Image (cartoon, rainbow, N blue to C red):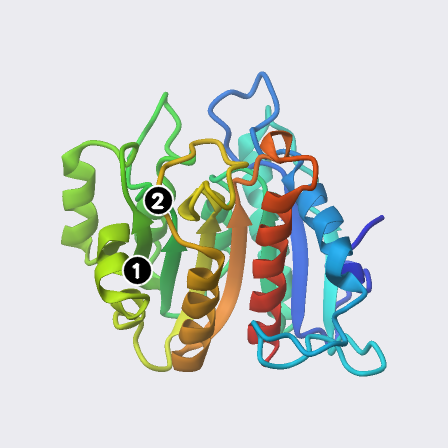
Amino acid sequence: MNTFCKLPYADVGSLDGVSVAVFGASEASPYKPDKPSHSANAPDALRLASMTFAGQLKQFDFDLQQSLFGSNGETWGMVDCGDVQTDRTDAETNRTRITEATQAIRAAGAKPIILGGDDSVPIPWFAGFEGSGPYTVLQVDAHTDWADVIRGNPYGYGSTMRRAAEMSWVGGMVQVGARGLGSGDAWQIEDARAWGSRIITMRDIRRDGIEAALAHIPEGAQVLVSIDCDGLDPAILPAVNMPTPGGLTYLDMIELLTGAAAKAQIAGLAMVELVPERDDPNRLSALIAARLVAVAMGLMRR
């Protein structure tokens, strides 16, 4: 199998000495169980895109300000655990497997990175952090995802942050990149703000810079980063389910990730909603998403 950045493969049940563990999940709770999720092939696409730079990871990385791998190719305890088996017709089992894999990684003392998969994948991933915290969720998304139940499904991709807010180990939330349409009715935004979520719109970012978001991350916090690919500008990453004009640039994302890691501790990362079938022939959207995962992996390893 291809592993992310050619990392060593490790079974999720055998993670002694591991610092960061990557694993994939194609779907959690899709709205249409009669067909694959829009991002079902994203974990493989992200791993494939990482092959384009995997051979250079001993070199100095200006985005990370150090090399990700050692001079002799050491990976410093970073591994890829492969994919959780999912079934689009069995959302409950999908959620259980994602949560259990996250718990197993954490129990081994490692930090989990999940490669989605559809945008409902973070819900059971957040659930895997029960028993510790409190955590601050840092979400990058064009949408706030504070719906309650859509099409009879309370665990779908429109409800991700509302479900996270119901978890007692989530103590704060910073949502970055909101713009345009698609975040639901006004009451959903009101609910998010009433709970205490800090919604940092793209207009805020363009006016005040990335510091508009970083200012709301508490010093020394444990941060769970959830990146929905449509949080980035579709001019640079168009391969998403709901492209929305505007959005963060690649360098905005680097500033956000490195700034969060300087102020707090990134305890986990979810990368979701890449739609490989909408990528260009050079797979540039997948490449950008994979690079962000690699940089985050280095920040988490520290």
Amino acid type of disc 1? Val
Query: Quarter holding the C terminus?
Result: bottom right
What element does badge 1 sit on?
Answer: strand
Q: Is residue 82 above or below residue 54?
A: above
Name the amino acid, label 2: Gly
Mark seen at residue 28: none
The residue to which callout 2 is attached is 246
Above or below 93: residue 123: below
Whether residue 195 is visible to the viewer of this picture, yes or no, is yes
Residue placed most toward the observer, 145 or 152: 145
Query: 161 and 62: which one is in front?
Result: 62
227 vs 98, left or right, is left
Mark 2 or mark 1: which is in front? 2
User: Residue 61: percent from the left, percent from the top?
Assistant: 64, 74
**Mark 1 or mark 2, which is nearer the start of the sequence?**
1
Residue that mark 1 sits on: 174
Looking at the image, which residue is at 61% across and 25% down? 36
The image position of residue 272, as x and y in percent, is 53, 45
Sort mark 1 into few (<14), some (14-19) or many (20+) by Cα contacts within 10 Å.
Answer: many
Q: CA distance from mark 2 to mark 1?
A: 19 Å
Left or right, 70 with reference to 166: right
Residue drawn at (30%, 60%) of the image: 174
Q: Residue at x 50, y 69 (%)?
A: 267
Residue 254 against residue 165 in the figure, above or below: below
Query: Disc 2, disc 1: CB below 8 Å?
Result: no
Residue furthest top in the image:
34
- In the picture provided, is 179 more to the left or to the right than 30? left
